[in-house]
Image (cartoon, helix red, strand yellow):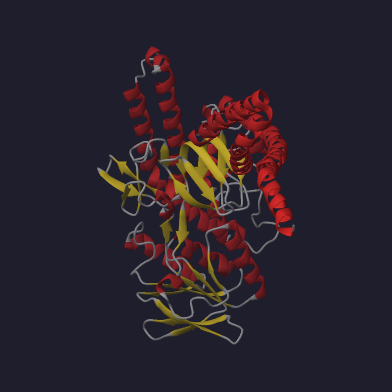
Amino acid sequence: MASSFNFVIGSAKFIFAPIERCLNCKRNFDENMKVLQKLLKELNTVKEVIELRLSAEIHGGTMQTEEVKNWLDDVQRIKTEIEIIERKAKEKKFLSRVFLGKMVEEKVVELKAFLRKGKAFLGMVKSFKYIIVGGGVAAGYAAREFDRQGLKPGQLAIISKEAVAPYERPTLSKGYLNPNPKAAARLPEFHVCVGSGGDRLLPDWYKEKGIQLILGTEIVKVNLALKTLVSAAGEIFKFQTLIIATGSTVIRLTDFQVEGADAKNMFYLRELEDADKLVESIKMKKYGKAVIIGGGYIGLEVAAAMSINDFDVTMVYPDPWCMPRLFTPTMAAFYESYYENKGIKIIKGTVSVGFNANANGEVKGVKLKDGRVLEADIVVVGVGARPLTALFKGQLEEDKGGIKTDGFFKTSMPGVYAVGDVATFPIKLYNEMRRVEHVDHARKSAKHAVKAIKANETETTIHYHRSQNLGLTGSKMERLLELSLKVGHLKKTRLLQKFQDSILQLRT
């Protein structure tokens, strides 16, 4: 009897198991279809926002990326596939839902992935027609030239690691160190372009012109072939035309494992933050001893500033005279004599090989190669700079330590330009390639690069019809630009007079 009953129960389970599975499949199908419809609605919203943004960016002159295009195409494909599933589900009702269940589950997974990618586009990708990487002098002068040449709002972005709008960097070693609070230079006084007698471009100016200042943002990865920049925070920036204006970074004694070079109150001067730290230390170490390592621009200017701040100043440099790349022995002798008459001691022909520090880690002595030890409360190092080109290694041709460009600052990669300290460019006057580290070059190269970019766009869009009507063919326009650049460098001799004037002004 019991065995017969078990047989009946087992047979019933066998018969009804498929039906139960079908019922479960129907329930899962219905639940998954509800999830699918919800996800599809959300996907449509994301798609509309992306299309709206792309429309605005294209109108502003920026480029729709290939990746976003592919995403939009895939969204349309998956929407069509879901419509087919819905149609089949209605045609055969119960059994069709059973057979379509697996397909619906896969579409739910796929749709979720598409949503994540779409939201990433909205939150992380920013596209511009022009991007300037670097927020120094060259960036500010390039922005002004873009505005002069004609720029639509939203076309240009400046991405800078610093937290402030472009400023005249030479001020940091001059007026910024003035001990008189009323006379000391402070922002917004020296934003570009006051250094060349132009208008001061305050942050509001960029906003009015529709130029986006992306400050406090460090670019850590570059793919020039894909026209993509990636920030330390993971933001993605797309460009049509890129201007590399990353400038230089100071050479640090720690790079050479100099003993004690990481002591406190040792300073390098490159950015506003560096100057602020030096000013604070000057206040804390009033009437102390300062040692300046280096006999170039920074060394001479900071030595003068520290003397004005009532420090006992000693300069140390390995060369037989100061600024040997620019000064003749006679010219250098004039400045050295002037400095010594103001109480600044100069030690030539030797270098620092180490530093002593107290228990608090503060620098107290500078050890020289010739065996002498100089007392020091503050040390300022100015031994040169290196162009910031590491992000572009292997992607652009290089020459003489910089990024190789032609006479219009175009690099080996189409749509990519390099200006200022990082650019190695041809100077026909000397028939050679040169890299120039000077603020005047940063200003002029930025201006000429923008002119070249705009001239190239004109040639592409209207084939220089207007220029030909004026008798200016493409080649003539290029020669005019080249001549203008050459004239700019012929003015180099005036820099000596400007340097002397700045020193005398600081000392008065």
**131 sits to left or right of 41:** left
Taking the image as shown, residue 87 lies to the left or right of residue 133, namely right
Vertical comparison of 362 with 465: above or below: below
Residue drawn at point x = 41 percent, y = 22 percent = 460
> Relative to the observer, which residue lies in front, 314 or 437?
437
Residue 256 visible in this rendered orientation of the protein: yes
Residue at 72 percent of width and 40 percent of height: 27
The answer to which image quadrant residue 485 occupies is: top left
- In the displayed structure image, the side of residue 161 where residue 40 appears, left or right: right
Question: Which corner quadrant holds the N terminus?
Answer: bottom right
Q: Position of residue 475 (x, y in %)?
A: 32, 24
Expressed as whole percent of the image width and height from the top left, the position of residue 138 reads 50, 44
Q: Nearer the viewer, residue 359 or 328?
A: 359
**Residue at 55% across, 36% down:** 127
Residue 174: tell me if it is visible: no
The residue located at (37%, 52%) in the rendering is 393
From this viewpoint, which residue is outermost toward the top?
469
Residues 119 and 21: in front is: 21
Percent coordinates x, y for residue 422 in the rendering: 41, 50
Q: Is residue 502 left or right of residue 409?
A: right
The correct choice, above or below, for 359 with respect to 24 in the image is below
